Amino acid sequence: MSNLLQEIEAQISGVKTSVNKQNVGIVRECADGVAKIEGLTDAMLNEMLDFGNGVTGLALNLEETEVGAIILGDYLGVHEGQEVKTTGKLLSVPVGKGLLGRVVNMLGQPIDGKGPIKEDAFYPVEKIAPGIIRRKSVSQPVQTGIMAIDAMIPIGRGQRELIIGDRGTGKTTIGVDTMINQARNNKVGRESGDKTFRPIFNIYVAIGQKQSNVARVIAELEKAEAMGDTIVVAASASDSAANQYMAPFSGAAMGEWFMDNGMDALIIYDDLSKQAVAYRQVSLVLKRPSGREAYPGDVFYLHSRLLERSARVAEKYGNGSLTALPIVETQAGDVSAYIPTNVISITDGQIFLETDLFYQGVRPAVSVGLSVSRVGSAAQIKAMKQVAGRLKGDLAQFRELAAFAQFGSDLDAKTQGILERGKRVVEVFKQPQFDPIAVEIQVAVLWAVQNNFFDDVAVEKVKDFQAKLTEFITTRKADLLAKIRTEKAISDALAAELKAAVAEFKPTYDVGKPKAPVELRKSAETPRKPDQSK
Amino acid sequence: MKITKQARHDAKQLFHICKVGGLMDETRVRKVVGAVIAQKPRGYVGILTHFERLVKLDLDRRAARVESAVPVSEAMQQSVKANLALRYGRGLAVSFAVNPALIGGLRVKVGSDVFDGSVKARLSELEASF
């Protein structure tokens, strides 16, 4: 009997909640989204702090007598003398497929009004990137749907490709087109029932952008039915600097969940220049020493630790990948400024967009000479490599000879050929926005260009010819496109079929009169008309 | 006011002088303050301001505040003081206060550490867990 009583007593004392030790501090000063807290002796670096009323903060500065913390959330509710508690946790965000189709803020809370989010896990916002052994080299393509990029600057799954240019040159457009194309490919792949098909999920991180711009991007994605495969993390211009500084890391955590679970994801950081500015603001308010252009000393580390988290993981660890397309805005085309040079040295290549090309009508305004992809043709399907392999070199030759184009017929036939072909290739690469092209159509069109089918089409009619050719092949030769899509290489039989198809289309199109070359010294050669007045 | 780095450094050194056996000694503090005011070295206002802050922080660190819903008996007070001395060593300045909002139990705050065993805290913990 006494045993039973003892047992019950032990159980009761076990159930009674024990008193935990908490660590508290008092807010001494609160300004500009940063709070200086006295006390908090047990605070650890990057630890989440609880300000009460659902406001959290991050301990960033651990000094001798106080802790400097940034406030994530509504900092207007924090006042001097308020009590702050440590939580012993790292800042974490919800991750998982439940986030697809949703617009969330930096903490992972939904801001689209579509109800709470069902997360699969909570991932820490700051995490160490996968080590060397865990990685595998990039070999699977990410089809952006933009011909200029897929042909000459191909991007692979797990690569980081920087999109850099002045304002208004089409950087966000490249990102949005890529996301739309991934959604389209996902749809085609799922419907085809191909077991080896791997969908790519999109994450768009908007940092410091106008909310109207973010709304426009979301509207375009919804119109193209791409929102179902996309997560939007929005830290717009009216959000605090702390939110803008941490938003890319939240996005990276969400992408890492896909990577850790054997899936592929694409993340677009739009843009990192604004994140650097927000980080500069936070660092200066925390009284950290400033360096070049008033940026703190660790602004390189800010971007390198973010971008290193995008990788392709080996089969043993799931074969997942996270591809990053960071966007950086330059001022007046100065790519040798501080932040652009930092990010260029971190990424595996860059896509340069030039304002001159943009206003000349070449859109996407990709500068072929300065853009590079360090992964290169390892990330292209064989068919694309076959048709586009020499394009970059040919266009480089064209650009060199373009200065002589004004001489017209005074050049030898070979140079004329290079010039004419180059002009047509530049025309073919022009593409309207929000209209990505499937890879099989790209292959077919480029094959036609490389096999001289475009050579007698007048330059101003090339776009129209391309559109009609695309329409012809899509409607009447759908099985040919399907073959290119599944075989991924142009065998001799496929080449013959392509030749037959294009040859069938060509006579139905009126190519127009080629422009007559300008005749010099005309007055000396033509006989002069007799004077009529006499 | 803006306190220069030199003033901060000097104040820190003066504070270290005031420590006897690891604990701050009040008589020494008074002597130091008197000496600084008498001699008026360069930037002495800044030195004294920062010195005051360091003293205040040290006092806060070694101040224990015990809050209860009802006044605590003498025996209980002694036992609490003994337990705290066990954990934190000697030199703690323990103060007792009555806070009816706690409903029941004790809330002990030593420096930055808070041991909250009050009924109010357990209720709010219960509320937060839903």
Image (cartoon, grey):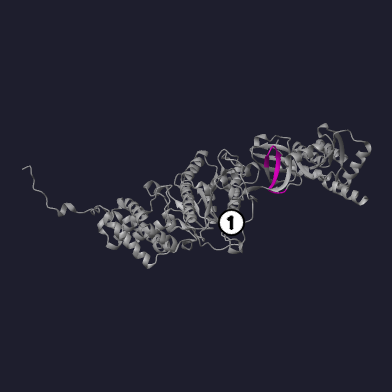
Percent of width and height locating residue B55: 81, 40
| Amino acid type shown at disc 1 | Met
Q: Nearer the viewer, residue A97 or A516?
A: A97
Q: Residue at x 82, y 36 (%)?
A: B38
Secondary structure mainly formed by the magenta segment: strand
Q: Which residue is mark 1?
A: A259
Given the image, what chain letter belongs to the residue carrying mark 1?
A
Q: Nearer the viewer, residue B43 or A526?
A: A526
Residue extent of the magenta highlight? A44-56
In the image as oriented, which residue stretches furthest toward the bottom?
A492
Q: Quadrant of residue A439?
A: bottom left
Q: Would you call the spot at circle 1 few (<14 residues within 10 Å), some (14-19), or many (20 or more)?
A: many
Residue A30 in the image: above or below residue A375: above
Residue B78 shows up from this direction: yes
Horizontally, residue A1 falls left or right of residue A100, namely right
* Figure quadrant of the C terminus of chain A: top left
Instruction: Verify whether residue A48 appears in magenta.
Output: yes
